[in-house]
Amino acid sequence: QSTAVDSNPALRHLHVWPPAPLGGAWISQLGVTSPLHASSSPSVKWDRSQDQPWRIPGAATFTRSHPRENRPSAQGGEFPLVRGWDPSTQQSILDPGFAGAQISVTPPEAIIPRGGSVTVNCSASCAELGLEIELSKKEVAQGVNWKTFELSDVREDISPICYANCPNQTESSVSITVYGFPDLVELEPLPSWQPVGQNLTLRCQVAGGAPRDNLTVVLLRGEEELSRQPAVGEPALVNHTVEARREDHGANFSCRAELDLRSRGLGLFQNSSAPRQLRTYVLPDTNLSLSAPRVVEAGTQVLVECVLGGLFPASEAQVHLALEDHRLNATITYNGDSLVARAPMQGLAGEEGTQQLVCVVALGGRDLRTREKVTIYSFPAPNLTLSQPEVSEGTLVSVECEAHSPAVVTLHGASASRPSERDQIHLNASAEDNKRIFSCLATLKVAGQMVHKNQTRELRVLYGPRLDKRDCSGNWTWPEGSKQTANCQAWGNPTPKLTCSRKDGALLPIGTQMLVKREIAGTYLCRAESSHGKVTREVVVNVIYHQNNVVIIILVAAVIILGTVGTAAYIYNRRRKIQIYELQKKAQEAAALKLNALASPP
């Protein structure tokens, strides 16, 4: 059968084969690849198994429409052409018999949440109309030339088609978009520690969410936006790389999914992941210093110190100080980007030998360590003995010094000799040897170092009293009324008792300050006595004083007064004699003038 489209010269004849209906199909669209002429008579064969047309070069392409009600009979016949396309004019080609049909759908587009409902109204220029959709629909209202349908539980984007047969078919579709929030927004776990200066890759996974064209994934550091990328794929995986900084220590990182439906009349919906905190660190490869004595005597305690600078954050670093398997009790002090760990270390008896002292600083899952060798040694003090610690003057004394092998000793005061494990001296005790300190020095070589121990003993020599001129001058001269001290020291062991007295029994205070009076003047006999004898020495005290000071003062005053009066009388008599002489001289001169006048003639 064929349908002639006489109103359009571009479409001359349409041959449909087979004549039977194509499985209830209706030819609804025609794409023209070249102008059709009466002689060409293009045809199309339909593959019912694949539901696709066979395209013949130079012929039109037909597309099967959806099934409709009230189609032509199965015997075939004439099929009305709905629309086509003329590439020569770039215009739509309509069947003239169909041009008068009109249909409208409300709303033309809609956006609803996943699982929601929407109402669609179809209106046409005739009463024969319907809504074609794969989902279930419910007709909720109708009127003359219109129907309203309710679509429920819509879970994906659909485009229902309103159609009408008036008598030819026309249709109009509505675009229904379903939106939904992501089911999962998660930032992958961050490293427990991240080195400063190294790259950190943030990974965010977003599952679900529609429409995807409106879904964006944002990666954040605190409130700072680091990256904004579209959600691509299901699930969407978004990566962003940043360089870890010191200031990122303790910072929270997160990702956020943004469903922006503001252009659709809705809002901006955000869904954020749980924040993850980042810890950054700096652990230098050098500068770890361990200070400790290289040799430690068993039973003694020393202080060891471990120092590291340039680490961050220093306060979160862990320090381990240990001598072999014995962990030390360290006290850690932090100062900026450095730390100092100090711990007491004790050498244990029975564990002599070379041991490893280790310091470990751990931060960020890494650690620095350094080791020092420490030698634990035993070194008993040398034995220093005196034949008698207390002897009388003139007694022979033996002094002996002995060390424990392999140490050697040096006895102070002994003649120079080759170092050995034993040394001794002999002496006759004298007063000068009283309270003499004998020293025995033991030396031991440990791990290339020389260590020393010293032992001392004091010798006490008993001797009689000594009262020498240098210690008791024996002649003091003091002015009366002054404050003086009589210094007189007696020597001896045991210490002698010293007294100084005159023949009249008066005692002279020794070693204490006193006010000098004339009564203390005289000669005293000083006695020094102890269990080992006694000695005496005479001392003289002279006091300078005047017997009658008042008479002397009066005499001196009288002499001064008499001298003054005599001097004044002498000066007065002298002046008086000079005046008498001058008067006599003037009288003589006057008499001479008078005689001369009388002798001269008139």
Image: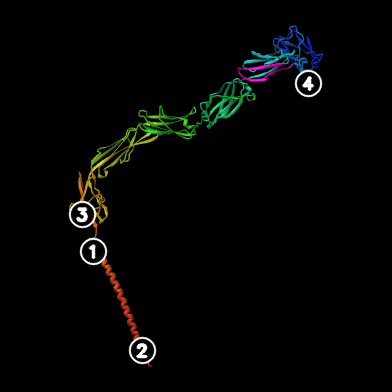
Is residue 352 covered in magenta? no
Query: In which image quadrant can residue 402 be found?
Result: top left
**Label 4 secondary element:** loop
List the residue tagged with mark 4.
89
Residue contact between numbered discs 3 and 1, judged by CB atoms under 8 Å: no
Decide which of tag 4 and tag 3 comes sooner along the chain. Answer: 4
What amino acid is found at the position of numbered circle 3 in the picture? Thr
State whether residue 227 is above or below residue 21.
Answer: below
Q: Residue furthest right?
A: 39
Which of label 3 and label 1 is nearer to you? 1
Gap in angstroms between the C-alphas marked 3 and 2: 93 Å
Q: Percent from the top left, x then y, of residue 153?
A: 61, 15
Can residue 247 be seen here? yes
**Label 3 secondary element:** strand
What amino acid is found at the position of numbered circle 1 in the picture? Val
Q: Residue furthest front?
A: 143
The quadrant of the rendering that contains the C terminus is: bottom left
Q: Which mark is residue 596?
A: 2
Q: Would residue 127 appear left or right of 39 to someone viewing this image?
A: left
Instruction: Decide: few, some or many residues near mark 2? Use Cα within 10 Å; few <14, some 14-19, many ≥20.
Output: few
